[in-house]
Amino acid sequence: MDNTATNIELLYEKAKTYTETSLELFRLNAIDKTADVSSSLMARIAIVMVVAMFTLFINIGISLFIGKMVGEYYLGFMIVSLFYLIIALILYFFSNQLIKIPITNLVIDKLLKTKVNQSTSISEDHEEL
């Protein structure tokens, strides 16, 4: 009888340890996924900001050049502004295809990429038991 009580206590301790380890693994996986997604997005945001600054200065130069060619500097800025209005309208009407879907796919890809690797290692761990 004493042997059965010891076995039950041992089983309880192993179940408790397994549950604590599983929760810790889940927490660490969540942290890893969050860090991966946020770092990828931050890197892309930094690149977009640099490209935006480059584009700003190029556009000022183009506006001044067009303004000089037309004879009035403000007309050069208006022509470049009209060009960006057209681009804004295109982005507005096709924002799902050009912005929302690619960003959603990026986040899903990052989340599932780590999940696939982990599920393979988890299934291998269960086979060992």
Image (cartoon, grey):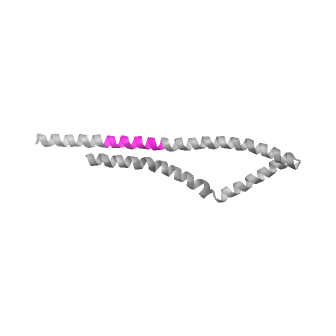
Q: Is 31 on the left-hand or right-hand side of 48? A: left
Q: Position of residue 35 (x, y in %)?
A: 49, 41
Magenta extent: 19-34
Question: Based on the displayed image, in which of its 4 quarters is residue 53 positioned?
Answer: top right
Q: Is 21 inside the magenta-drawn segment?
A: yes
Residue furthest bottom as drawn: 93
Q: How many marks?
A: 0
| Nearest the eye: 66 or 126 | 66
Q: Residue at x 66, y 56 (%)?
A: 91
Q: Is residue 108 above or below residue 25?
A: below
User: Where is residue 105 shown, x and y percent of the image?
Assistant: 52, 53
Residue at point 34% right, 43% down? 22
The residue depicted at 56 percent of the width and 51 percent of the height is 103
Quadrant where the N terminus is found in the figure? top left
Q: Residue 22 colored magenta?
A: yes
Q: Is residue 26 left or right of residue 86?
A: left
Magenta stretch, overall SS: helix
Q: Position of residue 80 (x, y in %)?
A: 78, 50
Extreme-right residue of the structure: 71
Q: Residue at x 31, y 43 (%)?
A: 19
Tell me the quarter of the picture where residue 93 sits.
Answer: bottom right
